[in-house]
Structure formats: structure tokens, C-alpha cells
Amino acid sequence: PPPAPPLEPWSMKTLGIVTAPNAPDYFAVPVPEPYGIKQYTEAAAVAAGAAGWPAGITLPPDAPVVIFGPPPFEGPTLPPALKMSLGPAPPGLPGIPPPGFGMGTIPPKAWAEEALKAKQDAKASLLSVSRRGGRAAAHDP
């Protein structure tokens, strides 16, 4: 069979993933089949390079992979020997539940957009209250 194409980073926009306006530029590198530790290490090296990390940074399997939920049931499992740590999603990715309360995947675009709008609406509401000296708008004479 021909060799697999080289791994390359993909932007969140290319993947259709909604990010907050102030989010850093994130990159994703798909882990190729057969989804083993070697493939995770190769993908992590490409992602780290795209993010500007220096060569020689600690990568899986020596560094744990931070996940915010288990892999989806219909997808491949994580390699049993891969070190993992449960943690929050990176900043600027709206609509992702707290660690352990959902699948470790990005939510559908509509959910993410709704979460981002809700956060912006809440921020605008707090700003409105703050500008009124702590009084809610409904109580203004």
C-alpha cells in the first residue's frame, strides 16, 4: 500500500469548531489508524510544533493526554497504556460540559454558538448592572 500522507495541523475553523472571539489559535492533528501510542505521539509532536512549542517537549506517552470526557462509544478507544488526566476543555471552546459530564468531543456547532451567545448575554447583563451602580435595570425608577 502507498505510504500514509504526512500529518498536518488543522485549524478549528477548518474543522467547523466554534471558538470564542478571544480564544487562542488552536490546532488539531488527527490521530491516524491504528490509534496506538505511536500514532498519538506523532500527532502530538505535529500539534506541539504548530502551537510553537520547542522540539524536545515531553509528549505522550511520557506526558499524559488531558481529556474532558471519554471517547464517543462509536469511535476508537484510547490505548490502555496511554496516560490520561481528566481536565477542563481549553479556554475559548464554548458549550463543552465540565470534565466527566459528557463525551470528550466538541459539541455540535449549534450548541457551541448558543453557549457563546449565552455567555455574551450574561456578560452584557452584568455590565448593565455594574453601570447602574449595582442596581438591576428592572428596579430603576
Image: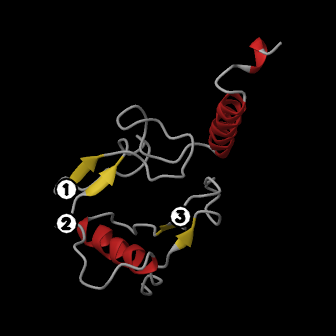
Compared to residue 36, the image places residue 56 above or below, namely below
Question: Which corner quadrant holds the N terminus?
Answer: bottom left
From the viewer's perspective, is the residue at label 3 or at label 1 nearer? 3
Amino acid type, residue under disc 2 in the picture = Pro
User: If you read the primary sequence from the N terminus, does the residue marked by circle 3 or circle 2 appear first?
Assistant: 3
Identify which residue is drawn at 79% across, 16% down. 140
Crowding around mark 1 (Cα neighbors within 10 Å: few <14, some 14 to 19, many 20+) is some
- Which residue is more in the foreground, 123 or 91? 123
Find the distance from the CA under tag 3 to the CA under tag 1. 25 Å
Q: Which residue is mark 2?
A: 61
Image mark for residue 67: none
Q: Is residue 125 left or right of residue 63?
A: right
Where the C terminus falls, by quadrant?
top right
Q: Relative to 59, is 81 above or below?
A: above
Residue highlighted by disc 3: 24
Task: Give the labeled residue for mark 1.
Answer: 83
In contact (CB < 8 Å): disc 1 and disc 2? yes
Residue type, numbered disc 1: Lys
| Residue 128 in the image, given as x and y percentages of width and height | 72, 31
Identify which amino acid the numbered label 3 is placed on: Pro
Q: Secondary structure at mark 1?
A: loop
Real-space Cα distance between discs 3 and 2? 25 Å
